[in-house]
Image (cartoon, helix red, strand yellow):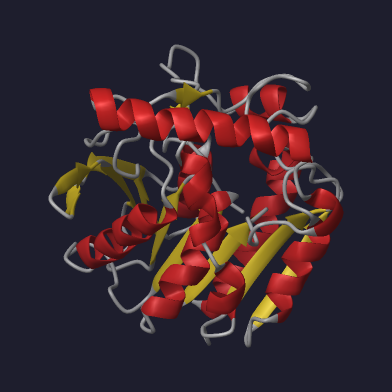
Amino acid sequence: MTDSAEIDRSDSDFLSEGTRCAGWLFCPQGIEKPPVIILAHGFAGERAFGLVDFARVFSSNGYATFVFDYRTFGDSDGSPRNLVDPIHHGVDWDAAIAHVRTIDQVDHDRIVLWGTSFSGAHVICAAARDKKVTATISQVPFAGMPKGPDTPKTKVSFWLMGRIFWDLIKTAVTGSPHYVPVVGPPGSSALLNTPECEPGYKALIPEGATFRNQVPAKSLLKIGRSDPISAAEKIVCPALVIAAEQDSLVPIDQVKYMASKLKNGEIHTLACNHFAPYRGEWFKENVKIQLDFLKRVL
């Protein structure tokens, strides 16, 4: 691993179904037509929340990187703000890939899709749609709706359904959604509220950044529209999966099951929680695995 390369960053926005999505292009200086890695965040995340660290490491090792915000998130346009919808996210991924193929500085024949958490599923689905993708990297990926002991308790589900129902009514009457918190402490009404969530999520947010800790409640209805396990059976490109053994959000057995469906996949596990691979020593170990994979497939 090296951090000696000079890196240029430029704005590179694109349209997805007519809505502007904000993108950053990182290019290593002195390398003609480098391979390019496209990155986007997980549930309610923004491109500035830790993804720049990955982009800079990849670019310092000779890869161009393209980091974007989904519509309604971060610096992108669209409303209602912060709507989590895997169908929309998938269209945004397809638009981002098409946009990258118009950028002269990069190699259009060597494109890697990189996703983390919820977007770890999106990249597998995108590769199933686009057979020209060279490889995928899924970090602590969402692997479909949990079943069995990981299913939310009945009273929690009733509470969530009440908030969703009210969102649908409020949106229909006023045009403005009813929001619920994204992250909070254990026992709170936040959607992500296991002990690791609040400190782990907020540690990704740069100092001075504005974070709207909310998503429309109807987002919960849409999560189940993501089916990465079925998509995993359809892709043939090399696919790396990084799983966290102490992940309280994504059951590791479910991630392993999804990875087992990949025809040309490999899985590495880290002895940490869901948010640890973004920072510190776990980040270093994590990107070392990813750089080794990139060297082999590119």
Furthest toward the left, the residue is 18
Q: Position of residue 9 (x, y in %)?
A: 29, 41
Quarter where residue 158 is shown: top right
Residue 9 vs residue 161, the one in the foreground: 161
Residue 152 appears in the rendering: yes
Q: Position of residue 95 (x, y in %)?
A: 25, 61
Residue 104 vs residue 220, the one in the foreground: 220
User: In the image, 87: left or right of 60?
Assistant: left
* Residue 123 in the image: above or below residue 194: below
User: In the image, 60: left or right of 160?
Assistant: left
Q: Position of residue 204 (x, y in %)?
A: 58, 28
Residue 104 vs residue 152, the one in the foreground: 152
Q: Position of residue 185 (x, y in %)?
A: 73, 19
Residue 216 appears in the rendering: no
- The residue positioned 32% from the left and 52% from the top of the image is 27
- The residue positioned 36% from the left and 44% from the top of the image is 7
* Residue 7 in the image: above or below residue 186: below
- The residue positioned 55% from the left and 61% from the top of the image is 121
Quarter where residue 146 is shown: bottom right
